[in-house]
């Protein structure tokens, strides 16, 4: 057996051009398949990671305007606190965003002002500097505000801390008590938290001059039960209006569903590209191995004529193919993993900000198994055929 | 145990080419003793190539018996025939049929590889065989680095490496010029002188005249069998 392995290695070394070509085919093929899989997983994972940024404890509710807008569908401000008693609801507050030309000292910026709550779950990002407003401030309609990272960048481009300063936004004067963290790189921030969040009581006092609102932001205690909670809220609102109006909700799952569709298509495309690379790699390897069929057939003729048995000859050709596969898959795996790792770290992780566990082993196994089957099949098949020929036929083979 | 190297009795060989039956050999009988130097001659279509393949155990007769060194090889399996070729026969082809990009030693020692001889012994015996054919200084040359005559001598060394009962040469000088042909034929004379049994298939009278005995075939039958006519 060792004898045959040595002989196979020697034959590969002797036919250097053919061996190198087959090896290049194998290395590129295996490498491409592994890299494509790694990148496919990295991309999908990054998308999934981005989707996680959507998880949010709040949803919006507003009259269903598909059948036309009716002023009578408004929700009485005095009734809103009653919603807090519904199971699953932590707090319901009026929702509105008001664009205001705002000033911090002499720095001017257009910012959205909106009501928010003292519960940190109202915010998609954690606090980075200072604090959120307290429930006491909420109860007393204190003139305090929490700014987003976006607002901070607009108002203080050089990064000087602004916590504790006074912001003027239209009719509003408020003390900046805190600034939120920036959303993770790449994650598409989806939240209802505005540039300037102020207690809803303060918002009502300064901006709302009506007794009804048309949109509410509802904080839920459990994301899993959000759909049920939404149903309870809309049913309650419909009941308040004697069944005359329907209400619709809007939460992160709506966008998550959209992304699920995109994500599904992406997975299919990555799969197709992966399969194509598998086929291309297979054809490449196959070509190189089949090109030498004439020379190999004559060689088999010689080997048979001088007394080589069919089994002996097949074993040797099989070992040649196996050696090729072993070396090619080894180098190809390293090549593919390095390429995949490099693109993943330099591009995908940098852009998405999401580090995904990648099934390195699975990618390698799939590529290697496929390449091994192709190489051994097409490396041994001509030998199998030729070894079955009459030695006379094989010697005459052109 | 027969004292003949080769004993062929009523051997026929029929091929099927589609629906047509081709009778390449129609009943050939002859014996060749150990140490004989025989040329098998005949024009194309005479059946001499088929004869060569049968004698060389590359092909089986359709009917009749063939004893090689006393062994009936008429009905052996492919693997048994391979064994016979390995142990009893040495082939020399018109086109040399050396393995490309493989040095002389490896080419010559190939039969020993299949016989399961250890690597060191294979090399030693190959060097000895190459030296015997006058190529002791070309042991690591590859076929494309050797002249036609030298390649054929490598092939002869390969044919001799297993100390075969019979040396079979199929148009051994067909690809060689006159001077190199004489060289190779001289080598055959030497081998004959050492007591080797040589069978050579050729269509060339000059070449055949080097043999001691000529068997002429025509249309699948032996038409004459006798001493070679020496050309002055």
Image (cartoon, coloured by chain):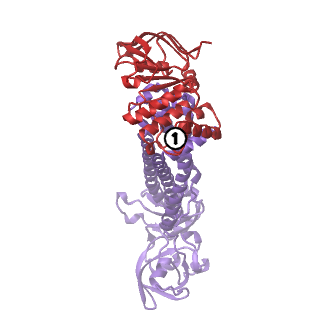
- Position of the N terminus of chain B, as image quadrant, is top right
Residue A183 % position (x, y) = 52, 71
Task: Judge whether A258 appears above or below B117 on screen.
Answer: below
Residue A362 % position (x, y) = 57, 49
Residue A159 % position (x, y) = 50, 85
Residue picked out by circle 1: B135
Q: Residues within 10 Å of mark 1 (few under 14, many from 20)?
A: some
Task: Judge whether A156 appears above or below A37 on screen.
Answer: below
Q: Colour of chain B?
A: red
Q: Nearer the viewer, residue A164 or B144?
A: B144
Q: Nearer the viewer, residue B121 or B157?
A: B157
Q: Residue furthest front?
A: B232
* Residue A27 appears anywhere in the view: yes
Q: Colour of chain A?
A: purple
Instruction: Determine the residue positioned at 46% across, 91% down.
Output: A105
Q: Nearer the viewer, residue A163 or A32?
A: A32
Task: Judge whether B125 appears above or below B47 on screen.
Answer: below
- Position of the C terminus of chain B, as image quadrant, is top left
Q: Is residue B205 left or right of residue A49?
A: left
Q: Secondary structure at mark 1?
A: loop
Instruction: Determine the residue positioned at 37% across, 63% down.
Output: A70
* Residue A172 appears anywhere in the view: no
Q: Nearer the viewer, residue A295 or A90?
A: A295
Residue A152 % position (x, y) = 49, 81
Q: Mark 1 belongs to which subunit?
A: B
Instruction: Determine the residue positioned at 42% across, 23% down.
Output: B201
């Amino acid at each position: 057996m060792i004898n045959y392995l040595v002989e196979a290695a020697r034959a590969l070394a002797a036919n250097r051009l053919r061996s190198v070509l087959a090896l290049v085919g194998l290395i590129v093929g295996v490498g491409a398949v592994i890299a494509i899989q790694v990148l496919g997983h990295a991309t999908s994972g990054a998308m999934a990671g981005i989707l996680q940024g959507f998880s949010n404890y709040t949803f919006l509710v507003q009259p269903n305007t598909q059948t036309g807008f009716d002023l009578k569908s408004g929700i009485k401000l005095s009734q809103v606190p009653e919603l807090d008693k519904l199971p699953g609801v932590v707090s319901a507050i009026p929702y509105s965003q008001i664009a205001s030309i705002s000033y911090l000292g002499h720095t001017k910026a257009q910012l959205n002002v909106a009501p928010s709550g003292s519960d940190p779950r109202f915010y998609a990002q954690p606090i980075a500097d200072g604090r959120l407003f307290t429930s006491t401030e909420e109860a007393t309609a204190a003139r305090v505000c929490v700014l987003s990272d976006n607002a901070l960048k607009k108002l203080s481009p050089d990064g000087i801390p602004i916590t504790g300063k006074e912001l003027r936004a239209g009719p509003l004067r408020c003390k900046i008590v805190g600034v939120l963290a920036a959303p993770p790189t790449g994650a598409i921030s989806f939240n209802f938290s505005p540039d300037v969040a102020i207690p809803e009581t303060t918002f009502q006092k300064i901006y709302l001059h009506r007794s009804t609102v048309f949109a509410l932001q509802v904080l839920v205690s459990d994301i899993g039960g959000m759909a049920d909670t939404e149903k309870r809220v809309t049913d309650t609102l419909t009941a308040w209006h004697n069944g005359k109006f329907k209400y619709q909700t809007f939460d992160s799952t709506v966008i998550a569903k959209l992304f699920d569709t995109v994500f599904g298509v992406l997975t299919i495309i990555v799969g197709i590209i992966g399969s194509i690379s598998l086929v291309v790699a297979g054809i490449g390897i196959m070509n190189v191995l089949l090109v030498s069929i004439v020379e190999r057939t004559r060689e088999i003729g010689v080997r048979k004529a001088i007394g080589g048995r069919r089994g002996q000859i097949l074993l040797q050709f099989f070992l040649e193919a196996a050696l090729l596969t072993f070396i090619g898959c080894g180098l190809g795996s390293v090549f593919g993993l390095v390429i995949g790792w490099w693109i993943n770290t330099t591009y995908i992780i940098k852009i998405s900000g999401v580090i995904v566990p990648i099934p390195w082993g699975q990618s390698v196994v799939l590529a290697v198994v496929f390449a091994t089957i192709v190489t051994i099949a097409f490396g041994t098949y001509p030998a199998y055929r030729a070894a079955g020929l009459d030695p006379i036929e094989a010697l005459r083979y052109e | 145990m027969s004292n003949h190297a080769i004993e062929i009795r009523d051997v026929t060989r029929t091929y099927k080419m589609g629906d047509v039956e081709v009778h390449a050999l129609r009943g050939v009988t002859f014996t060749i003793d150990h140490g004989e130097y025989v040329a098998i001659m005949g024009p194309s279509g005479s059946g001499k190539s088929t004869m060569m393949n049968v004698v060389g155990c590359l092909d089986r007769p359709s009917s009749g018996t063939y004893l090689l060194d006393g062994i009936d090889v008429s009905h052996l399996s492919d693997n048994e025939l391979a064994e016979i070729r390995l142990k009893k026969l040495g082939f020399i082809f018109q086109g040399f049929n050396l393995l490309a990009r493989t040095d002389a030693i490896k080419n010559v020692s190939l039969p020993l590889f299949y016989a399961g001889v250890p690597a060191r012994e294979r090399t030693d015996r190959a060097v000895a065989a190459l030296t015997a054919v006058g190529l002791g200084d070309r042991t690591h040359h590859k076929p494309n680095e050797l002249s036609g005559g030298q390649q054929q001598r490598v092939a002869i060394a390969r044919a001799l490496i297993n100390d075969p009962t019979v040396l079979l040469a199929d148009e051994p000088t067909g690809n060689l010029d006159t001077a190199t042909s004489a060289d190779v034929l001289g080598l055959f004379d030497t081998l004959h002188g050492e007591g080797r049994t040589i069978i050579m298939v050729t269509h060339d009278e000059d070449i055949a005249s080097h043999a001691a005995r000529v068997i002429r075939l025509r249309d699948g039958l032996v038409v004459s069998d006798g001493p070679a006519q020496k050309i002055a």
